[in-house]
């Protein structure tokens, strides 16, 4: 689906090698633990929502865009938007089974040039203070991802507030795959700041690195229960490189070649059982792993 474009980003590719020694030295190495069947299955509704982010608003809002949409039949749509080009598709709704508002953003479509250019804007910049009030200027994020998130931030916030009021819930879960995961991670931080009484969480798939060390630390403090799930030798999660200042937050779940899932503690755990250690460069990655399957689910509408 979209993974092909990332390998063409020569600047990123040339620097996407093993972690800087200084960061490895300060990483706490706790036990890597396997996930149970029940723990893996608990992610599946969110996996379908992340996949559904690729559907256009007209199909998503009517919830009739194929098997991945129909996998969560109790979902109640609230709002959607985007054009799949200048603005990624997105939707907001409520899942009564999960008792959570769901926010999903589309991943990159390699047939659309503007999303590709968005991903290529990898300069680290301070977050917009009008959206992320009170956040230190030392917290920096990928400029392209931040611009994509800002383009829908107010509409997403309004829809989330509407859904929370209509369904009497404080739970919000942002989901997405690849670029969609990056936007949704920024959304989760944004929503947690804009609505401090809400219980915001993030579950992402094939997440590229989004920000610097200060950003990863802030995410860890604001979203301590988040999960970013990486499939086998997917190279996208090792981009942009740690070498140019990017760091993943904690919460990685890695699907191994055996299809077993493990929880990788810390930020960018360099164990061979986790993505940073398993895929030291894009040349040891496999772009075919990017779209899944994630417990049997392939990304795409």
Image (cartoon, rainbow, N blue to C red):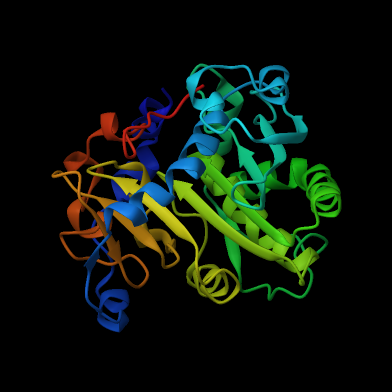
In the shown orientation, is residue 193 left or right of residue 242? right
Is 186 placed above or below 249 here? Answer: above
Which residue is at a point 73% across and 59% down the rendered structure image?
A: 191
x then y, percent, for residue 170: 74, 62
x then y, percent, for residue 112: 56, 19
Please indicate, yes or no, whether residue 38 appears anywhere in the rendered image: yes
User: Foreground residue, 67 or 175?
Assistant: 67
For residue 33, which quarter of the picture?
A: bottom left
Which residue is at a point 55% across and 52% down the rendered structure image?
A: 123
User: Foreground residue, 286 or 34?
Assistant: 34
x then y, percent, for residue 109: 51, 24
User: Foreground residue, 251 or 12?
Assistant: 251
Please indicate, yes or no, whether residue 240 appears anywhere in the rendered image: no
For residue 297, which quarter of the picture?
A: top left
User: Foreground residue, 131 or 290?
Assistant: 290
In the shown orientation, is residue 77 left or right of residue 274? right
* Image quadrant where one finds the N terminus: top left
In the shown orientation, is residue 18 left or right of residue 188? left
């Amino acid at each position: 689906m979209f993974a092909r474009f990332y390998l063409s980003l020569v600047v990123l590719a040339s620097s996407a090698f093993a972690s800087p020694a200084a960061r490895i030295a300060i990483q706490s190495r706790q036990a890597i633990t396997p996930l149970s069947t029940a723990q893996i299955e608990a992610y599946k509704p969110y996996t379908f929502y992340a996949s559904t982010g690729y559907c256009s608003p007209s199909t998503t809002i009517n919830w009739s865009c194929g098997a991945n949409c129909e996998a969560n039949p109790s979902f109640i749509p609230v709002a959607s938007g985007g054009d799949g080009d200048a603005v990624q598709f997105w939707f907001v709704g409520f899942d009564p089974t999960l008792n959570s508002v769901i926010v999903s953003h589309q991943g990159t479509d390699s047939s659309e040039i503007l999303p590709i250019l968005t991903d290529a804007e990898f300069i680290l910049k301070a977050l917009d203070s009008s959206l992320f009030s009170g956040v230190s200027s030392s917290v920096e994020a990928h400029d392209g991802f931040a611009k994509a998130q800002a383009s829908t931030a107010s509409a997403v916030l309004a829809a989330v507030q509407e859904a929370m009021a209509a369904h009497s819930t404080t739970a919000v879960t942002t989901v997405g795959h690849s670029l969609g995961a990056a936007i949704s991670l920024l959304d989760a931080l944004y929503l947690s700041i804009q609505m401090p009484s809400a219980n915001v969480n993030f579950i992402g798939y094939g997440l590229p690195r989004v920000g610097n060390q200060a950003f990863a630390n802030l995410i860890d403090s604001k979203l301590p229960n988040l999960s970013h799930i990486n499939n086998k030798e997917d190279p996208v999660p090792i981009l942009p490189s740690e070498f140019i200042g990017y760091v993943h937050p904690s919460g990685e779940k890695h699907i191994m070649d055996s299809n077993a899932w493990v929880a990788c503690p810390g930020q960018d755990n360099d164990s061979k059982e986790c993505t940073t250690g398993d895929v030291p460069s894009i040349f040891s990655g496999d772009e075919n792993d990017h779209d899944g399957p994630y417990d049997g689910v392939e990304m795409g509408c």
